[in-house]
Each structure stands twice: as C-alpha cells, then as structure tokens.
Image (cartoon, helix red, strand yellow):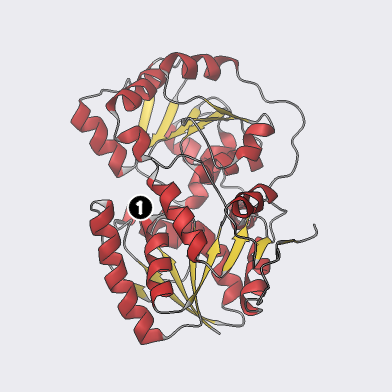
Amino acid sequence: MRVVTVVGARPQFIKAAAVSRELRREHEEILVHTGQHYDYEMSGVFFDGLELPRPDVNLSVGSGSHGAQTAAMLGGLEAVLIAQTPDCVLVYGDTNSTLAGALAASKLAIRVCHVEAGLRSFNRRMPEEINRVVTDHLSALLLCPSDTAVANLAAEGISANVHVVGDVMLDVLKWARERMGDDGATPLRKLGLSEGRYLLVTLHRSENTDVPSRLGGILRALNSQREPVVLPLHPRTRKAIGTAGFELCGHVRVIEPVGYLDMIRLTHSARLVLTDSGGLQKAAYWLRVPCLTLRDETEWVETVASGWNVLVGSDSERIVGSVRTFAPPAPHPPLYGEGRAASRCVALLGGGVRETDGHSCATSWPS
C-alpha cells in the first residue's frame, strides 16, 4: 500500500514519528512537509530529535493568512497526489496542513485517514475547530484517542469506520523516555534550574497571541511569579509581544523553541506546566506534572475530569492564584491508551475501509 502522509507543524511531527516507524515496516510512505512551520527551530530540530525520516517533499509554503496558506498547500498537495497516486492520504490533528491534505485527497477521490479524529472544543471561533470538523467529515477512516471522541463523531452522524486506538503521542513519549538515559538533567544545567523548582510555560494559540487583552493577562501573571519561569517562545508569540510592547521580568527565562527530547525533560522536571498546547497538556498528565491550561476550553476533557488539569483562561489573578494553590488529587487514572496506538493505526490502515449499511463501526482495542 502506498500512503502519502501530510505534516506541517510540530505536533504532527511527533505523531508521525510513531506511525511512520510502524507504517514503513510493510508499506510505502511518501512524507510531505507543507512547510507550515518552516524554520529550523520550529521544524528541523524536531525531525532530528524524533528520528523521523526526512520529508520526501517540502512544499515550503511558510506563513500567511489562513486562506492564503491553505490555498498554497492545496495546489502543492494536489500536484503531489496526482504524481504519486497513493492508496490513502494520512493526516494528523487540526492544522491548516490537515485541512489541505483532506481537501486535496477528497477532491481526487483518494481516501483520507484522520489520526486524532473526533476532538472538539465546541468553539467555532477557533480555526483548529473548523479544520478538525471538516477533516472528520471528509475522512474514510477515523482513528480516535478516546471514547469521548467517538461520541463527538456520533453526535455529528459519523459512525462508520470509527475506531478508538489511543493516542500516538503516548507512543512517542514512551520511546523518548527510553532514550533519555542519564542526561535528563542537561537542559536544567544549561538554564541553571533545579528539579521541581520552576514553571514551564508555552503560549502559541492565536486566541491568546492575537488578542492583546488575553496576551497581556497571561504575561502579567508570569511577571507576578515568585519562582523561575521557562518560556520556550513561539515566533508568533515573540512577534505579538514585541508589537504590543509587553516586557517580561528577569525571572521569566525566554528561550528558543527546543527539540522534543529536551521538551520532555523540561516538562518532567517542572513543578507546574502552564500551556495552551494540547500536546503539552497530555505530556504533563502522563508525566504526572500538574497543568494549568491557558484557555477557556480544551479538547482533552479527560485530563480536566481527572483533576490534574485546570482551565484558567487568561485572567491574571486566576492564573496567579492557581499557580500558588493548585494541587492535583492522588488518583491518576490511565488516559488515552497504553502506548501502542501507532501499531493499531497501521493495522486499521492496512485493513482497508469496511463498507457499511449505516450502522456503527466504532470499535475499541483491549489494553
């Protein structure tokens, strides 16, 4: 089977690292990087750290408005798909690259497989929400991380070829921890940090970076902390901070984006994580690090229900208070599988899509 895999942003590189390793054992994969994250700090370093194969095609689309960026991807992907004639197009998550891959494939009558299907924030103001909803409705095979995702799809009338496989990011996390060895403290030494004595923050979603009042509230909360804050700064956030004229206090350590292994090390050793990233919410949970989510909603509702993740939005007083008082409960139930999602995805992909009479084909895998 020939599969074209479309990636374009850091979370997709992580997910593809797990699935590509399994996929290439028995199938042919053409890896297409749209160039949505186009500089080395935002993409190249992730390819290196994850041992992901170099892309066969790089569309080098770069940044731009949602319409312009997606249109450029569509044109490039259509040409690739016509040339490669794949049996399937594999897309991940909820970025513009995901949407473009699904649209280009469906218009050429190539089946679409969506890894991380069924997630919903129920906030249609989020570009990511539009991307994931449209992609799910175009997909022939929907691979979900949880039963909640399956229920979301069912509520929209999607029940055929829906499967709970777990989360492929847990596969990568387990792989990474096996390879970290004794150098897990290296990033801490470089930054002069002590285990459990700093906050790790990531901030990149447009709902925060493009709204000065939200960005200002979050940054004021960071300036108010009494312990070191490590902030790997996304280019979008750096630009927004500069444009708004915000200044950060000296205890907020702004660093360049880091590779996946170093990010896991920094997460594991943090006292607390503050983030608007879905991937980091999950990583913090799996590493048993309390998390405050800098959003008003999350797709990863199970982490909130567990008590290990709290939605704090952008209100500075709420963030500061939560940093000082939040303590998760002792129970830590397993979430999103046990780290074997990639092999399940590939098995279902290789098995083709079942024809149905409209009845549910949602299935789960035993632990």
Dividing the picture into quadrants, the one containing residue 126 is top left
Q: Is residue 254 left or right of residue 170?
A: left
Rate crowding at label 1 as few (under 14), some (14 to 19) or many (20 or more) other CA atoms within 10 Å: some
Pointer 1: what residue? 42
Q: Which one is nearer the viewer's eye here, 272 or 311?
A: 311
- Residue at 30%, 60% in the rendered image: 70
Dividing the picture into quadrants, the one containing residue 71 is bottom left
Q: Is residue 236 left or right of residue 169?
A: left
Residue 364: give x, y in percent of width and height.
Answer: 74, 60
Q: Visible in this render: residue 171?
A: yes
Quadrant of the rendering where the N terminus is positioned: bottom right
Residue 265: give x, y in percent of width and height.
Answer: 54, 43
Secondary element type, mark 1: helix
Q: Which one is nearer the viewer's eye here, 280 or 205?
A: 205
Residue 121: give x, y in percent of width and height.
Answer: 51, 41
- Residue at 20%, 25% in the rendered image: 245
- Residue at 55%, 39% in the rendered image: 281
Q: Amino acid at mark 1?
A: Met
**Extreme residue toward the right, this view:** 366
Q: Visible in this render: residue 287?
A: no
Q: Is residue 261 left or right of residue 96?
A: right
Quadrant of the rendering where the C terminus is positioned: bottom right
Q: Is residue 131 above or below residue 299?
A: below
- Residue at 61%, 74% in the rendered image: 349
Q: Which one is nearer the viewer's eye here, 110 or 183?
A: 110
Q: Is residue 161 above or below residue 350?
A: above
Q: How many marks?
A: 1
Dividing the picture into quadrants, the one containing residue 292 is top right
